[in-house]
Image (tube, rainbow, N blue to C red):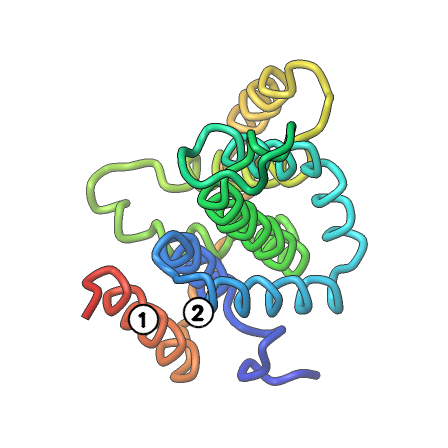
Amino acid sequence: MARRGELSQFHPATRIAFWILLALLLPVLDWKFLLALSALLLLAAGVYFPQRLIGVLRRNRVLLLSVLILYCLITPGQPLGEWWPVRLITLEGALHGAMQALRLLAMLASLAWLLGGLGRERLLQGLLHLLQPLARCSLDVQRLAVRLTLTLEYIDRHLGSAAPRWQDELDSALQLRENEPHAAIRWQPESLVLQEWLILLAMTGLLVYCRLGV
């Protein structure tokens, strides 16, 4: 059996926290680091969860293309050429559009990596672990964890798809799941190992460094 120290066996709370920190980090990275990180995430998701990655990219191809085109057309700047329709596209718009498309691509790849490596039960356990301190504020952390789990799963399945009114389907699923007894949710407290704390600490430090611009 694999040891906890291996990447695939990291605590689900670690993987979820890493994904949240990654989402906060992506908007502040310059293009070199963004390009390298996007390539790394695509490679990781493609190697370990190829079918999930292909599915999420196929469903969101129109969204990715739309982001790129909109930035190219609405951002003021130097036209790429003198002849139509190239003169409608600006250099600054193409660069900004490519950056935004890369950020979205990285988030989609990281979501495929997160959900591919965690089943519903482990995803729920990770969210319960992260949300447990809020229970002291009389917050129903089990219900909140269930809602977040189902929301992430539906985003992975339906974001960018042409399925009509998938939000209504999500609301129905949330209502049905919340009506189930909470006793069915089994949470087994488990401490994070040293390697996991070091990874999260490094990610947090990098985020603070980039945010402060020091």
Residue at 35 percent of width and 49 percent of height? 131
The spot of residue 4 in percent (x, y) is 55, 80
Left/right of residue 162 with respect to residue 110 in the rendered view: right
Residue at 27 percent of width and 45 percent of height? 135
Residue type, mark 2 in image: Glu
Spatial CA span between label 2 and label 1: 26 Å
Q: Which one is nearer the viewer's eye here, 41 or 1? A: 41
Residue at 28 percent of width and 37 percent of height? 139
Q: Of the numbered discs in the image, which one, if any, rests on residue 206?
A: 1
Query: In this picture, is 17 found above or below 180?
Result: below
Q: Nearer the viewer, mark 2 or mark 1?
A: 1
Query: In this picture, is 80 found above or below 154?
Result: below
Task: Name the image quarter holding the N terminus.
Answer: bottom right
Helix, strand or loop for disc 1: helix
The spot of residue 27 in percent (x, y) is 38, 52
Q: Which one is nearer the viewer's eye here, 108 or 187? A: 108
- Give the residue at mark 2: 190
